[in-house]
Image: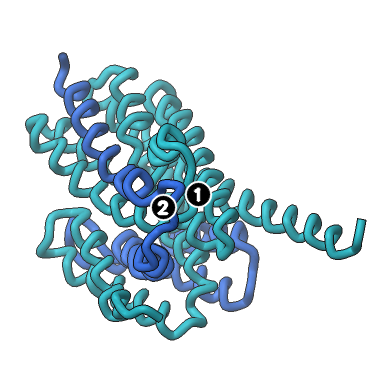
Amino acid sequence: MGSDQYDQVVSDSAIRNQILRQAGSISLAVSPFAAAFGIICAEADFRLIEAIGFSALVFGGSAQFASATVLADGGSVVAAVTAGALLNMRSAAFGVVMAPALKGPLWWRALASQVMIDESTAVGSAQTELRWRRYGYLAGGIGVFVLWNISTVIGFTVLGNAGDLVATYGIDATIPASFIALLWPKVHDPQQRLLMVLGAAIALLGAPVLPPGVPILAAALAVLAARPWRAS
Amino acid sequence: MTDPLLTVLFLAMISFCFKSAGPLVLGGERDLPSWVDRLALLLPAPLLAALVASSTFVEDRAWTIDAKAVGLLVAAVALWRKLPFVIVVALAAVSTALVRAL
């Protein structure tokens, strides 16, 4: 075995460990929110199977919160579905981001798509090589999926007021912190930096005037500034 | 059929369409058009920055500045000092909690 091959093995496991640390931290960071979601469902007198249905089948943090809150406030099914759908619309943009890394048979692409959420896309797109983007996406997606569903059940059955715990221990700050940490390596590229500033500006300016969730999707329009139709 | 169950079923179907459109339409074995690869590299920056901005500075569709802003600032400094991911996230939580405890 040549030394080149050995180096390759060492650096592969180093990359794998780094990705698993990122995926593990982000999965832990979101799980208190799933517990809070379980509590909302319990307080709204949903059944446990319905809370799990949200977390396993809908599986999109902000969409679940929006949709369950509408129902808890006495809103209609149509209103609840619309609120959730607007928030999950951005996963269509994530799908374009991850598509090159998720090649495979049709059934596999369909299955892998179920974990197309903010966190899996964040971990996946933070990697450079295609195979590591795929690995990061799956590690982040599966890690969050498992902890999210376990925490939903714990919140529903055990906890009383995890909403307060989230604020008291600053857990709500871990989500933006995770995303900015995964974005950080791109900060040194002027074009990526411009896109970040534009994306954040669109999201903030849109927040008071557009329905919740739409400003995030609208931030995708920032890429027009990079003139993606130009063959580079 | 209860309202929550109906909501789950419809929302799950709609969400899955959004989630899977990219991989199902663009993710086959054939080579992807080059604009997909370009968009795949350009889209994460504005989308994730939008998530950072709105999860920190938007509450109930209104602009807001609270303890989370301090957490984000601490995270940025920690990243600039090249601290590991786990530490960055933990520092953001601790500093936000401290500001709230004051």
Where residue B98 sits: x, y (%)? 49, 61
Where residue A80 sits: x, y (%)? 14, 36
Quadrant housing the C terminus of chain A:
bottom left
Q: Tell me what residue is drawn at x 74 percent, y 53 percent.
A: A13
Discs 1 and 2 lie in a common subunit? yes
Q: Badge 1: few (under 14), some or many (20 or more) residues near its Cα, within 10 Å?
A: many
**Amino acid on which disc 2 is placed:** Ala
Q: Check the rendered structure and report the hue given to chain B.
A: blue
Q: Tell me what residue is drawn at x 9 percent, y 37 percent.
A: A79
Q: Specify whether A3 is left or right of B25.
A: right
- Secondary structure beneath dot 2 equals helix
**Amino acid on which disc 1 is placed:** Tyr
The answer to whether the residue labelled 1 contacts the one labelled 2, judged by CB atoms less than 8 Å apart, is no
Frontmost residue, A146 versus A167: A146
Name the residue beneath numbered marker 2.
Answer: A99
Marker disc for residue A137: 1
Q: Tell me what residue is drawn at x 51 percent, y 82 percent.
A: A188
Q: Tell me what residue is drawn at x 58 percent, y 72 percent.
A: B78
Q: Check the rendered structure and report the hue given to chain A.
A: cyan
